[in-house]
Image (cartoon, rainbow, N blue to C red):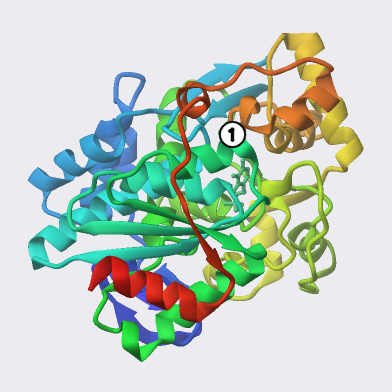
Amino acid sequence: MKFASTRDKNHIVSFQDALFQGLSPDGGLYYPIETPDLKSSFSLFDQNSSFQDIASSLIVSLLGDEIPESDSQILAKRAFPFSPELKKLNDKINILELYHGPSSAFKDFGASFLATSMEYFLNDRDQKAVILTATSGDTGSAVAKAFYDKKNIDVVILYPSGRVSPLQEKQMTTLGKNIHALEVDGSFDDCQRMVKDSFTDKELSGINLSSANSINLGRLIPQSFYYVWAVSRLKNASEVPVFCVPSGNFGNLTAGLYAKSWGLETGKFIAATNRNDVVPSYLASAIYTPRASVQTYSNAMDVGAPSNFERMQTLYNNDVSLMKKDIIGCMVSDEDTLATMKYMDEEYGYAVCPHTAVGIKAAMDRTSKESNITVLSTAHPGKFMEVYEKAVGKKPQLPASLLAVKDLDKVSRLISNSSKELKKTLLSLFS
Ligand SMILES: *Cc1c(COP(=O)(O)O)cnc(C)c1O
């Protein structure tokens, strides 16, 4: 499979190049230019196919020209020592729990595959790389866990001092080895600017800098695998499954749309957002109006200009009526988010994070029209303790990943919010 930039169809690269470049040099996002028909391999999967089996088979189908079959099994094993779980909520709604990985959020699937495949290709090329990334919390912990102890790769994480939750900070600063945490005396925007400046700084060109942000294809591709896994479990239902996806940057949803385009039997997708509803608004009005984000209780979805919208537009040839055949938009208010978290506890004794609650509310609103909806559960409720307590009136259980780091000592390096100081630090670490 080859990949092209959403801004220039003639700029075509391999998976490896897309992986290490992240963003295309023209500012576009890489997308698959081919649409393989994988129906026959999807039909072979059933209850007994493990997530690793399905991942390994898809790695060969999609990336076989760069990752041979024998290696795909090793990669799938290394990348996915964890699996999704499917829970039946009631006659019409299932929940696809994607938070059983090392940082307790679905981003583990993408981050882990990214790290494992980078390590694999670097080994082949006999090269080293340094991943430089800015985080406001969630991405940093998934990336740190995913890259921990990987060969030939160091990770430098910048985070705004005092502006990430204490537990998130612990997740990034207690690993050691090849994970370096830089605590920046400034904002998340400062961190992002400093990272950007480093990528264009000539004095740093001796260091092989790469990014691990969510637009990277290495994070997007593996997110399609769990839709295939879920359908292998939902096959005997009388109606094809409809997926409901709590969305911010729309990477998760885009991965599902790709799986459908490759022949996965699904119905429509419900794009569930909080008040940052530019995509539902686009589907309703045919006019796309990105805007500054507003803060909500489901803060990992507070995105006013979703990065993957470019990929969605490319997939549907910029035709809103085509997109509407596959996607239903639904906005859920903060009030309904909290009420749904409480309802889930009272009615089902089932704890959900605020993002998952947005998806569940959107699904419940559709059950008069659809009777086989699977909601993606994107994070463990214990990661959002304050919101959970506010909604439900009691403390959630902490996931194992957080219990393990709670009492460890943080190790970070405090730096000022200047690109110069970041450069000095990088040179002292890596040259
Ligand atoms: C990142 C994130 C989302 C949004 O996913 P996108 O792929 O950006 O749409 C939803 N929930 C949680 C918990 C997240 O961390």
At 73% across and 54% down in the image, what residue appears? 302
Q: Position of residue 149 (x, y in %)?
A: 24, 44
Residue type, mark 1 in image: Ala
Residue 173: which quarter of the image? Answer: top left
| Residue beneath the point at 53% across and 67% down | 315
Of helix, strand and loop, which one carries label 1?
loop
Q: Position of residue 60 (x, y in %)?
A: 20, 50
- Other residues around mark 1 within 10 Å, as few (<14) / some (14–19) / many (≥20): many
**Residue 242 visible, this angle:** no
Residue 256 rendering spot, x and y as whole percentages: 51, 48
Horizontal side of residue 255 vs 389, given as left or right: left
Query: For disc 1, does the CB lie below 8 Å from ligand 1?
Result: yes
- In this view of the protein, which residue sits in the foreground, 42 or 375? 375
What residue would you read off at disc 1?
Answer: 379
What is the residue that sits farthest to the right in this orientation? 335
Q: Is residue 285 above or below residue 100?
A: below
Report the residue at 76% width, 26% height from top: 388
Q: Examine the rendering and report whether any part of residue 51 can be seen.
A: yes
Image quarter of the N terminus: bottom left
Q: Give the image quarter of residue 382.
A: top right
What is the count of numbered marks? 1
Q: Quadrant of the C terminus?
A: bottom left
Up-down relation of residue 335 to residue 279 (above or below):
above
Q: Looking at the rendering, which quadrant does residue 322 occupy? A: bottom right
Residue 128, horizontal then vertical, whole percent:
19, 65
